[in-house]
Amino acid sequence: MKQQTFEAYSEREIRRLNQMHDCMNQKGEVDCGGKIKVGVDLGTANVVVAVLNEHDEPIAGVSCPARVVRDGIIVDFLGASRLIREMKDRLEERLGRSLDVASCAIPPGVHPGNVRIIRNTLEAAGFEVDAVVDEPEAAAVSLGVKDGAVIDVGGGTTGISILSSGKSVYATDEATGGTHMTLVLAGAYGLSIEEAEQLKIERSESREIFATIRPVAEKMASIVRSGLKDHEVDQAYVVGGACSFPGFSKVFEQYLDIPVVIPVHPLLVTPVGIAMSCKEY
């Protein structure tokens, strides 16, 4: 099956993701005279804060590696709130204004009690929380997807959302993600978790590395296939840093038997969508 390219679907979304990539962790002041929208993505491996202008164009962002979330659940409340506060302070210094309101996201199916903890974490960091959205739905907003399946491969979970006419008709989440790839690499190469994570990031283009973690990608694809079996889906969009490996989309296409789209900068798709879901101020 011929792989579909993201470029065939929306140049506007590609441009937005490229802008977000260029904004990440830049130094120096940013001209910010209009209204803004803020999104906080609390991931298992990384925390990302994205700032957009009122036209949904990225103007600033920051990303930090972190181990404060596990399988969509905050396991270090103080560490998470402290890190978000530090990231918030850095962005406020760059933008020359306060960041008061933000949206955040959760994997599908998270218990309401854990949603409350995520809200509390952002509030402890100094944010008023505008909205809490499902991660795959945030990715769909970022990509402008109205129909099809959006799969968010996070550090700890694989989230699935099926959309029809812009509305989610099915959502689920399973505990397999990029962290499981890291564990496989650590065992295969005799590395610490930190060393294996660095190897995964630095050699994401390596076919040798992907061959080692391919069983995890196949497990993810199997999870998605089970989630889609009772639904008619013509196309799947896969986002999240773990899908950056060459060969990842091919594995998913083999399991799903539908075109699979992996956009540019897949790690940034969900943070941008979270910010787009926030009210402007």
Image (cartoon, rainbow, N blue to C red):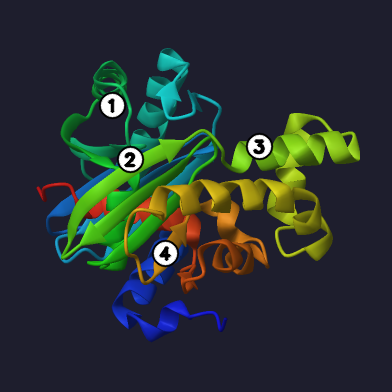
Q: Label 1 is placed on what type of residue?
A: Leu
Q: Label 2: which residue? A: 40
| Residue 35 seen in render | yes
Q: Quadrant of residue 237?
A: bottom left
Rendered location of residue 87, percent (x, y):
40, 36
Badge 1 vs badge 2, beta-carbon distance below 8 Å? yes
Which of the two discs, 2 and 4, sits closer to the camera? 4
In the displayed orientation, state which residue is furthest to the front.
230
Query: Label 4 crowding class (10 Å Cα cut-off): few <14, some 14-19, many 20+?
Result: many
Residue at the spot x=73%, y=44% of the render?
Answer: 198
Q: Any mark on residue 237, and which?
A: 4
Q: State the SS at label 1.
A: helix
Q: Label 1: which residue? A: 122
**Does label 3 or label 2 sit earlier along the sequence?**
2
Which of these two is toward me, 94 or 71?
Answer: 71
Q: Label 3 is placed on what type of residue?
A: His
Q: State the SS at label 2.
A: strand
